[in-house]
Amino acid sequence: MTPSLALIHTQFGPYHLARLRSLRAHYPGPVYAIQLADQEALRDWTVDADADLITVATGTLESLSPGAIAQSLVQQLDRLRPDALVIAGYHHPAMRAAFTWARRQGARTVLLSDSQGRDRPRNPLLEALKGAWLRRHCDAALVAGSRAAAYVEQLGLPSDRLWRGYDVVDNGQFSTPLSLPEVNPHFLYVGRLSPEKNLRRFLQAYDRYRQQAGAIAWDLVMVGSGPQEAELQTLAQQLDLTVHWAGFQQLADLPAYYRAAAALVLPSLSEPWGLVVNEAMAAGLPILASTQCGCVPDLVFPGINGALFSPWDVGQLADVLLRFSQRSPCQRQQMGQASQRLIAHYTPDHWAIALTDCVLFVLGDRRPERP
């Protein structure tokens, strides 16, 4: 009988469900999809009720007892007895309990990770402890890209135990025939309105851009909600900016915003990957991104499909906005086409193929000879 697999997330949102469907199509054995809770405070997702999920606890994750969730998850694992566990991170106690259960039962473990070493200051002692724990509990990892791979390898997991391609979206949901707007082109931001997204500096840079561009300055559309929403709207009013606040949008409604825009701007100070970049590239948009975004070494190539800037340099970001808005429609279209070509291999099917290969490796089916 083909070994069974348990895929464990805090909650299965639309991104995860697209990947899950592909995994069930590619993995040769049973796939159990386990979520710790059916809601998360940070993500107001609308989720398909027919996704065949196992929910450990009902309610909002942040309001539930971590210890109780961990205990209930272990009970589910005792019932299912999966041969391999694919676990999204180790921050939540229940995820660490899953790793511990696997070691006790002899099951194999694969970590899903998009963390990068540069996204925030790191405590060397804590990193050493984290690395020691990871080496004891984790057999392999599926990571987002080159920066995530470097970080997990730095923690001590060998490079031959790392697979790439964790952060993907359903490109087909966003891809459309390319047609840049000829009337009122505008910049687009999609994401949470929160401090790590660096939106105060972004609005200040946009203000400088408008002063430099004058009457031909592009508008700005902001899609999302979050704790800084009122503060940012007040700042925009004080700067007398033309900003269109679209609020939070479900995944199904986002393609229309991408289709209408001329470029995506992601100015984050901390961004493990940036799935909105995948979405925008699938929709054929150029990308203007902060160098702190985890995806940039793998997805954003200056002059080819976008531009990069330091998130701390307001003047530099203003200059990037100005230079890009001065490009011809033909040049912008070429950059958008390059985005679509670059993102073509970041799909749920590729994710499922890579993860299946990783799981079979740790189960012993593809273990290479070592010198």
Image (cartoon, helix red, strand yellow):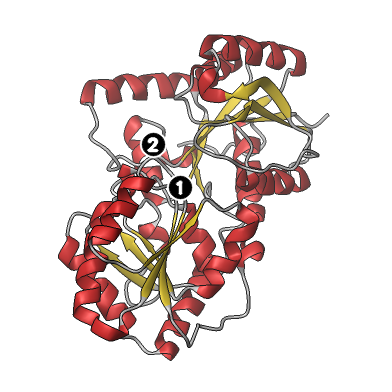
**15 lies above or below 263:** above
Instruction: Find out whether the residues at labels 2 and 1 contact each other: C-beta distance under 8 Å.
Output: no
Q: Position of residue 135 (x, y in %)?
A: 42, 23
Residue 306 is left or right of residue 161, and the answer is left
Residue 189 is left or right of residue 268, and the answer is right
Q: Disc 1 marks which residue?
A: 225
Q: Nearer the viewer, residue 6 or 242?
A: 242
Judge whether residue 284 can be spotted in this image. no
Judge whether residue 364 can be spotted in this image. yes
**Label 2, label 1: how many angstroms apart (C-alpha)?**
31 Å
**319 lies above or below 107:** below
| Amino acid type of the residue that numbered disc 1 sits on in the rendered structure | Ser
Answer with mark 2 or mark 1, whichever residue precedes in sequence. Answer: 2
Image quadrant in which you'd find residue 46: top right
Q: Nearer the viewer, residue 47 or 208?
A: 208
| Amino acid type of the residue that numbered disc 2 sits on in the rendered structure | Val
Q: Position of residue 263 (x, y in %)?
A: 42, 72
Tag 2 secondary structure: helix
